[in-house]
Amino acid sequence: MGKFLFYRLLQAVFVIIVVTLIVSFTIRLTGDPAVMLSQGSGSVTEADLEMIREALGLNQSFAAQYVQFIQGLVVGDMGRSFVGGAPVMDLISRALPATLWLAFASLAVSIVVSIPLGIKAATSRGTWVDQLIRIVSLVGLSFPNFWLAIMLVLLFSIVLGWLPPSGMSGIASFIMPAATMGIILTATNVRLVRTTMLDTLRSQYIMVARAKGLSNTVVLYKHALRNCAIPLITYFGLQFGGLLGGIVVVERVFNWPGLGSLAFDAVAARDYPVLQGVITVLAMMIIVINLLVDIAYGLVDPRVRKE
Amino acid sequence: MKNGKVLLKSLLASVALAAAISAQAGSLTIASPQDPGSWDPIDTFLVNWASVATNVFDGLTYRGPDMALVPGLATAWEENEDGTRIRFTLREDVTFHNGEPFNAESVKFTFDRLLGEEGAQGPQRSNYTAIDSIEIIDDYTVDMHLHQPDPVLLTKLAGYGAMIVPPQYIQEHGSDHFAIHPVGTGPFQIVNYARRERVELEAYADHWGGAPRLDQLTYRFISEPSTAIAELQSGGVHIVIPPTVPIGMIDTIENNRNTHVASVPSPTVEALRFNTESGITADERVRRALIMAVDREAIVDSILAGQGQVISSFQGEFSFGYDPEMEPIPHDMEGARQLLAEAGVEPGASLQIDVRGGDATFGEVAQVVSSYLQMLGLNVSIRGYETNVLLNDIIPEGRTGEMFQQKWGGWTFDFDNTAYLMYHTGERWNPYDSDEELDAMLNEQRSITDPARREDLLQSIARYTQDRALEMPLYSINALYGVRNEVQNFEAAPDNRLRLTDVYLED
């Protein structure tokens, strides 16, 4: 276990270095933050711009700036935002919980809906029920999420006035963003559950279980579902990582104060420290999720535990 | 017993209802597209800083939505002969939100800070470099010594970097603290700031101009237009401020029975500028022909839904230097064809227009312009760049096509702010042209303190740029505010600097 963790740690450091190196380098190819900063002001001379660059540390070489970033990272300091000078750590620690809560809620919505539907589709394979579920999920899959988000807002906030159209302010404000993300995930997940379930139901131990005279429910939910769990957990885990990246659009439409909108604004303002910080945190989280997925295998499958 | 409970319940409910109504009467919420991140005047560079901070801080002078310059923290001022010293008489009995008194010391501290080492790290200092030093004459009189006269200085003192800050508070708590817990002398004080979400303000009852009518004022930061407008329609916000409302959503707001659009000409102007160095646009006749070929009135009416005005030079009607007598070069397709033939431009000659790719409205404008130019027989292509790339690389490095989009505007509404940067040799926004006569005029107007003479010269500069056809001036655009009908006394500010002292909500 110790050796396993050690390799995982090495891997993590490597991934973070590669990812931040690429992002920091490419963002610097487009646009000068000093110019972005002084756009509202009337008469900016080259000398003024140079002074701002110096204040931001942009007059140093890319290598020097990058080394400084890594040095800071080791001691948990990600520098300060170019826009307004807030410590990047503060910005991220405000945004991270908002994103995590939303991602959890979306994944929960999708799991709760997709498992029963997927099983139902698998057990009624070839019937109209199966067809219906598959068509509905295909339709769900084809929705662009921003469109879905806007339609939800139109219906539930403007026409009916039931839900707040944006911001994070209590349980009610979670419903639409989580549903938007959740519906699209559900569409994929139903198909995944269905396929995995069909494979499992063909195996011999299911036949044995049935031959023993066990009830349908027990066969499905105790024997089959448990064996489906490994591919599903892997997939849900990866999906969680993907969610963190794909949440940008939904966060923007719902004005959700999370990492996605933070990253979006940082790109727009060429706020290098914030962008580097967000990317680092996202990379770390995806690494951690992968680790958790591996550990979860052991919990559901005794065979993995023994290895 | 049961009846008693019901009675108690309804009593409680009515109390709660009454409380809700009275809170509602004085609590206004605004959607602003961007969190400036710091409230310190010397850090600021964003218009949306000013739409909050104009309520929090005062300058020596004040300029409201009517564009007239009036006393602020200074009750009077007087310039010496050669325009190198301004003496300010300061308002007495003014206090900052923390109780600290305002006096000559605060003024000196503010400008020492702006022009010193701290100010050098921000973008505001460059606007005030005409100021040499502040000399305290007595507690309520200061002399501002200038390196050279700056005709726009009194206007600049009404906003942004020149807002007066409290010396004791900053010395005690430091600038980092001040940036998120700012203290000024304005009608509202900031009481709670949640980064990237909202900033909450409360009325400052001791304000020298009288207490504001609202009790509370909240700004929520919402960048996505459709989200901000959904909030407006559902009552989550009362006002959506520029630059949020897109032309395409005006009808959505107007058609809702609770909301309307308030619009006012803004300082923002758009032009398609020319590469005067190479390509067919190096020839003045060609440039003039291209301008004549485009019906700009039709563009404003159809694409901007009338929310703009055709301009004759690169400035709008509120700009100092705007000449109401000066006409735009008229739309004349036949004249354009002749001029183009005279210049020897062959049919099928190519012309590239560079635009900001993310700007949907201007994308349509560029399409229309290109179809007019195609009628001249030109082979026109439109190239969209990411805004930052266009502004930071393509234009300053002189790598544009024959024409490129320039969107411009400054809160001072002075043509100098545009003309110098666009036309003076060697300036960042002037990668192609060099004209000694124009340079001389641009330099001269900066040293004239007599406003009438200076206005004349600025108008001559505008005419000169039209004679040389340095750009295709298109239009000035209106600032669009989405407003709920219960908001009373709201005056749309052309420059987005909101001061909401007199605004209130009707039940």
Image: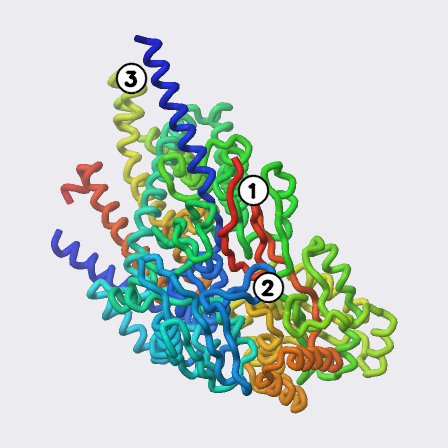
Mark 2 → mark 1, Cα distance in angstroms: 25 Å
Q: Secondary structure at mark 1?
A: strand
For mark 1, what is the residue?
B484
Q: Amino acid at mark 3?
A: Ser
Q: Quadrant of the N terminus of chain B?
A: top left
Res. A191 visible in picture: no
Direction from residue B237 to residue B369 in the image, left or right: right
Chain of the residue under label 3: A
Q: Secondary structure at mark 2?
A: loop
Q: Nearer the viewer, residue A168 or B262?
A: B262
Mark 3 → mark 2, Cα distance in angstroms: 82 Å
Q: Nearer the viewer, mark 3 or mark 2?
A: 2
Q: Residue at x 36, y 77 (%)?
A: B112
Q: Nearer the viewer, residue A252 or A209?
A: A252
Where residue B27 sits in the image (x, y, percent)?
A: 44, 42
Give the colour scheme shown: rainbow
Disc ID at residue B356:
none
Tell me which corner region of the image, top left, top right, bottom left or bottom right, holds residue B327.
bottom right
Chain of the residue under label 2: B
For mark 3, what is the residue?
A215
Where residue A136 sits in the image (x, y, percent)?
A: 50, 32
Disc ID at residue B67:
2
Q: Amino acid at mark 1?
A: Arg
Where residue A132 sits in the image (x, y, percent)?
A: 51, 27
User: Do the residues at discs 1 and 3 belong to one chain?
Assistant: no
